[in-house]
Amino acid sequence: MRQKKNEYRKIWWNEKKDGYLWILLGVILACIGLVGVIIIYVLDQKMELFNYPIQLIFYGLMLVLTFIGGGLDLVGEMKFNKDFRNYMHKNK
């Protein structure tokens, strides 16, 4: 079962199904959020660029962006699982 799922995942990625775009967008948004937090942290520690309330706003925005990315990734994985179940039913 696991081997079939891995084989189907390769097919699914190559065909760039609908869920593929959700996963890709989710990963990109989550990475942007993570990089944003790191940049804000480094800039504040080295240069004291942001006041404390502004830091919290930026951290909150990046956290929301990361959660949205995680949610989109989850939606893409659910679409993959649905497509895989349909694929398994067709090939029985």
Image (cartoon, grey):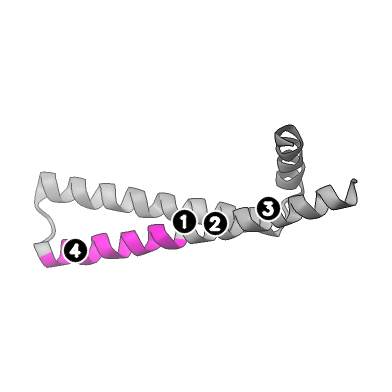
Q: Earlier in the sequence, mark 4 or mark 3?
A: 4
Q: Which mark is residue 74?
A: 2
What are the residue bounds of the magenta stretch?
A: 53-68
- Residue 37 higher or lower than 57, as above or below: above
- Tag 3 near tag 2, CB within 8 Å: no
Q: CA distance from mark 4 to mark 3?
A: 36 Å
Nearest to the eye among marks 2 and 4: give it.
Answer: 2
- Tag 4 near tag 1, CB within 8 Å: no
Residue 75 painted magenta: no
Q: CA distance from mark 1 to mark 2?
A: 6 Å
Q: Earlier in the sequence, mark 3 or mark 2?
A: 2
Query: What residue occupies the far top of the structure in this picture?
Result: 3
* Residue of label 4: 56
* Residue of label 1: 70
Q: CA distance from mark 1 to mark 3?
A: 15 Å
Q: Amino acid at mark 3?
A: Phe
Badge 1 density bin: few <14, some 14–19, many ≥20, Cα 10 Å: many
Q: Amino acid at mark 1?
A: Gly
Badge 4 density bin: few <14, some 14–19, many ≥20, Cα 10 Å: few
* Residue of label 3: 80
Magenta portion: prevailing SS class? helix
Q: Secondary structure at mark 4?
A: helix
In the visual, does 72 lie left or right of 38?
right
Q: Amino acid at mark 4?
A: Leu
Quadrant of the image containing the N terminus: top right
Badge 2 density bin: few <14, some 14–19, many ≥20, Cα 10 Å: some
Residue 80 % position (x, y)? 68, 53
- Tag 4 near tag 3, CB within 8 Å: no
Residue 7 location, quadrant: top right
